[in-house]
Every structure is written in structure tokens, then in C-alpha cells.
Amino acid sequence: FAPWEDPQAKPLIQFQNVTKRFGGFTAIDNLSLDIFEREFFALLGPSGCGKTTMMRMLAGFETPTEGHILLSGQDIDPVPPNKRAVNMMFQSYALFPHLSVWDNIAFGLRRDNMPKTDLEARVEEMLRLTRLEQFARRKPHQISGGQRQRVALARSLAKAPKLLLLDEPLGALDKKLRQDTQFELMDIQEKTGTTFVIVTHDQEEAMTVASRVAVMDQGQLKQVATPDRIYENPNSVYVADFIGDVNIIEGRATATGDEAFQIDWAEGQAPLTATSSAGVSNGQSCHLAIRPEKVTISAERPADAINAIQGKVHDIAYLGNLSTYYVELANGTIIKAQTANTRRISRRSFTWEDPVWLSWTATAAVLLAN
Ligand code: ATP
């Protein structure tokens, strides 16, 4: 039972109808959200949607204009940042350049006057956790970017916060190191059992590390769900489009009785069929969302196809492991079909201007109201 599915589970963090205004501008708009202990929770959304404002309110650098934020059931609005069991790790993880790795990690503990033996044990534990034992005596400029990032993490976890906020923590790392560090973050999060809330621009990163993802738009939550649910069952065109690649076909839905919909989408074209829908009602205009990898491309119309439309190849993107075909329909719409290149391809299956069929099953697409 995941905690968010368990009605008995008590959230670690509760946003209760939180609104944050800066002057006349509403950055967070009557937002409610529960985050549970041990979650690795990701906030996703375009620039300016309010992700950082959410983090700053959790850390105590901003206070809600309306509503409340609870930590373990207690209203934290009156609690100053340094008294909260919350720590924040910034993208520009300012380490003290003149202090060793060891002393950087010890810094907050010294400030809290932790007894010497406890402090030493704690620093050693953090060094082991982040695999930095051999670098303990070095200064930040004597270690790599990835190692510095681990020092920052060790430092933020040293005081055993209940909640760690990570604002674009891997933004400064290159792609390969970034991926390794994602797995490391997940491992450390699991070992410490600390709740992590991460802000990232990188949707793949959010999908990799997070137990749940919140997709935000203009200070509101569009959808909060597990990565696979967000991908497979987006609740709106906005979410479908924000996470991964998607084809959208506009049409009008007719309920067929067996929980399926028939979608009329273009003059003279056979209607499409979809069984999965989010808030679409009979007779309504709708958007059919279908992921490119769920569209099959073929020379002939597959005999048993439920959904099949004709087009011609407009563009081909060869990506090594995958190829994406951009297929133009009679009405000018471009539909992307992605195929896995599992075998060595000596000659591409289709080329420009080839007439092709695109097909998919009734369950492959999601019907969206907006
Ligand atoms: P990014 O991904 O670019 O960091 P974000 O989603 O983190 O964006 P926020 O930094 O939370 O966005 O900002 C949300 C909105 O609130 C923006 O339009 C921003 O201009 C505005 N805002 C944030 N802080 C202030 C402030 N102190 N005064 C006025 N407006 C602010």
C-alpha cells in the first residue's frame, strides 16, 4: 500500500488551501497537497509556475498569504527557517572554499554545539553514506563537481532533517554524471528514509527519481501521481504534452455504451475508438492523446486494426535505437510514430513520401476533455 493510497496514513507535509501573492500577482493559487514520509516527491512545471515559491514556503523563506502549511500535523507558519526540521540544498551548493570536506559537513553540527564524539560519528557516517571518506581532508576545489555535489548533500543531511528540499540539485552536472547521480540520490534517500522534495526542469529526471510527480501550471496543480500514471493516464492535454512526446487529435466523442468512445475527427475518415478517458462526456469535443511509441506504422492496413489512418511519410528522425516517422494525414495533421530499431537496419523500412498506415489499439490512447 503506497501511503498516498492509504486513508490512514498521516502526511508529513500538508499544504492546506495555500495562496501566495506578491503584490497583486498570485504565484500560488489556493493549492492543497499532501506529501508523505519517505517520499521522493518531484515538482515539475514550466518556468514561473511557482515551484521555487513552494520550496521557499516549506523552508520558511516565504510565508503563505492565505492557508497553512503543516509539518507532522503542526502549523509551521510561525516557526523560523532554522527551527524547522527542513533543509534546502541549492543548485549553487555554496561550500565553504577554505574548509575541508570534513569541516564543511561538520559546519551545521558545530553551530548547534553538538558534543564532539557525536559530531565526529555523524560526520563519518555522512562521509560513508556519500562515499567521500577518502576526500575528507580535501578542499572543495580539490574534488570534482560530482563529489562537491555529494559534499553538499552530506552537509544538508548531517542534521537529519525530516525533509530535504532539492532545488535543481543536478543542474550543474553533465548528462552522464547527472544520470549516475540520480541513482545515487535515490539510494541515499532510501538509506536515510528522509523525505525529499525536488524541483527540476528535467522531466526525465523527475520520472526517474520520484515516487510521485506534481505537474504545476500557473500556481496550481494540474496532476499529482506516480510517474507511470502521469505518463499513461495524463488528465489533460497540458500534462500529456509536458511529460514526454504525444500526438493530439481533436474530435467529437460519442459514447458507445460499453465504456468506449467513438471519435469523429475528420470528414470522410472512419471514426477512432478509445476506451480510456479523463472527464469526457457524450457529444463533447475532445482530444485524443496517443504516444508515438504506441503507433504502429505499416505498408498495409493491418487486418484487425481498430484504429487505422492513412498518411504519407513527411520526415524521419533516426536516433540509433529508435526511429521517429513524421506522417502527414490528408488534413495536414502530422502524427509521430516511433519504432524501436531492435535489429540492425541495413535499409530503412520506409522513406519520404511513402504511403503508410498508422494504427493503434483501443486502449493505447487516452481521451481528454481539455
Ligand atoms: P523557475 O523554474 O524559472 O525557477 P518557478 O516555477 O520556480 O520558476 P517561482 O520562482 O516560484 O517559479 O515564481 C513564480 C512566480 O512568482 C513568477 O512569476 C515570479 O516572477 C513570481 N515571484 C517569485 N518571487 C517573487 C517576489 N519575491 N516578488 C514578486 N514576484 C515573485
Image (cartoon, grey):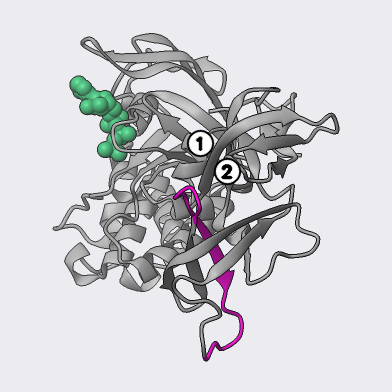
Residue furthest out toward the left: 98
SS of the residue under disc 1: helix
Q: Which residue is at the front of the view, 234 or 204? A: 234
Task: Give the residue drawn at x 71%, y 41%.
Answer: 274
Q: Which residue is at the front of the view, 141 or 331? A: 331
Residue 88 vertical placement versus 280 (above, below): below
Residue occupied by mark 1: 237
Report the image quarter containing ligand 1. top left
Q: Amino acid at mark 2?
A: Ala
Task: Give the residue drawn at x 37%, y 41%.
Answer: 114
Q: Amino acid at mark 1?
A: Val
Local crowd at mark 1 within 10 Å, few (<14), some, or many (≥20)? many
Are the residues tagged 2 and 1 within 8 Å (C-beta)? yes
Measured as percent of width and height from the top left, residue 34 is found at: 57, 26
Task: Give the residue drawn at x 63%, y 58%.
Answer: 294
| 201 magenta-colored | no
Residue furthest out toward the front: 268
Measured as percent of width and height from the top left, residue 138 is found at: 24, 69
Q: Which mark is residue 166?
A: none
Label 2 vs label 1: CA separation?
Answer: 7 Å
State left or right for residue 111 relative to residue 180. Answer: left
Q: Which residue is at the front of the view, 47 or 209? A: 47
The answer to whether residue 188 is seen in the rendering is no
Quarter of the N terminus within the rendering: top right
SS of the residue under disc 2: strand
| 334 magenta-colored | yes
Measured as percent of width and height from the top left, residue 327 is found at: 49, 61
Rendering quarter of residue 59: top left
Q: Which mark is residue 289?
A: 2
- Which of the marked residues, 2 or 1, is nearer the chain's N terminus? 1
- Specify the segment rendered in magenta: 329-346
